[in-house]
Structures are given as C-alpha cells and as structure tokens.
Image (cartoon, helix red, strand yellow):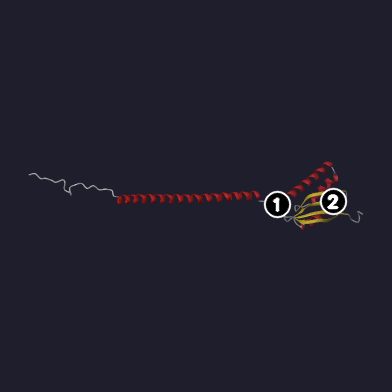
Amino acid sequence: MKQWVNLYRRDLQPIKQRLTLARLSAVLGVWLALLIAVVVVTQWQNSAVTQENEKLSNALQAVNDDLTRARERLERREPSLQLREEKEELIQQLQDTQSFSRRISEFQQGQSSSVSRFLSELAQITPEAIWLTDFSIAGENIRLHGQALNSEALVLWMDKFGQSDLLADKRFAVVELKRSEQGYQQFLLQSVRTDEDK
C-alpha cells in the first residue's frame, strides 16, 4: 500500500528565519552595551591604578623631600652652646698646659737652680685639688695661675706657702678668681711687696 506525502504542504516546508532589522538592532545593541561596559570597567581600573601610582609617587616624593631637608639640617646644624663652651674650655686648658710646659722647658734649658728648687718645693705642698696651668718668676715677682677644686682648697694651699723656703717670706694677693663652666675655681695669684721689701 503506497502512501503519498505532499511535500508542498506548509507545515512540512522548511522555515526560513530571516534576520530582521529589529533583531539586528537588538543584537548590535547588546554587543555595543557589552563593549561600552568593558571600556568603562577598563577605564575605571586604569584610573584606579593611575591614582594609586600617583599616591605612591607623592608619598615617595614626600619621603625624599623629608630626607633632603633632614640632610640639609644636619649639614647646617651648629653644635650646642654647651658643646661650644666645653670645646673652648678644653682649648684654653690645652693652651695653658702647652704654655706651662714651654715655660718649664725654657727654665730647664736655662738650668736655673732657683727655678728647679721653686718647682720642687711647690710640688711638695700642692695637693691634688690644685693644679697649675701657668706661672712666671721675674725677680721677686711670682705669678701663679691655675684651677682649684673649690675655694677652700685654694685657701688651704696658700696656707702651706709657709712650708716653702722660697714662698714663706712672700705675701700673695688673689688677683683673679672666677668659676669655670665645669665648676672649678680659676685663680691668679700675684706676690705683693711687703714693708720689708721696700
């Protein structure tokens, strides 16, 4: 038994779908929206990265500026007043010591027996609380310059001058007395003429 199929029937014919303008517009619209979204996200990410880079650059520049200013301050920084005073005091003590040593050398080279005797007697009566930085002997005139731990030590030392044959018959006056930055008493003693010397 044969069956015939009518292929020209509408329901059996293939359906040809056509891309309409509306559908094309919708597809293009979707793609355009996706493209715009991708571009916006990319620009936002790039902007965020750029801002972060700018922040890091600014922070790095600020650190470099701080280092530069700190370096300039260190280069321009002057020592404190206390350090300058201590430096000047040490320089003065060094100069006094050098002068004292030079005078001793000059006296030693001159082979002055009276000076040697004077230094020997002075060393015997001088305590650790007293130290000379300079002295001079010109005939009967004697000048003693140095530092004392305190005023009491200076008075006790001057009382011992009577134990020295060369100093016992001399009277000394305190020409200068002042306190150093370290708290020591700087003194200058000068022998004065007595009635017996006149």
Where residue 113 sits in the image (x, y, percent)?
85, 44
In the rendered structure, the answer to whether residue 32 lies left or right of residue 114 reads left
Of residues 33 and 158, the one drawn nearer to the viewer in this rendering: 33
How packed mark 1 is, by other alpha carbons closer than 10 Å (few <14, some 14-19, many 20 or more), is few
The residue where tag 2 is placed is 142
Secondary structure category for the residue under label 1: helix
Question: Which three-letter amino acid code belongs to the residue tagged 2?
Answer: Ile
User: Which of the two discs, 1 and 2, labels the residue nearer the N terminus?
Assistant: 1
- Please state, as top left, top right, bottom left or bottom right, where the C terminus lies in the image: bottom right
**Is residue 176 in view from this perspective?**
yes
**Camera-side mark, 1 or 2:** 1
Secondary structure category for the residue under label 2: strand
Where residue 36 sits in the image (x, y, percent)?
39, 51
Location of residue 160 by image quarter: bottom right
The residue where tag 1 is placed is 84
Of residues 130 and 101, the one drawn nearer to the viewer in this rendering: 101
How packed mark 2 is, by other alpha carbons closer than 10 Å (few <14, some 14-19, many 20 or more), is some
Give the residue drawn at x 82%, y 41%. Answer: 109
Question: Which three-letter amino acid code belongs to the residue tagged 1?
Answer: Arg
**Is residue 165 in view from this perspective?**
no
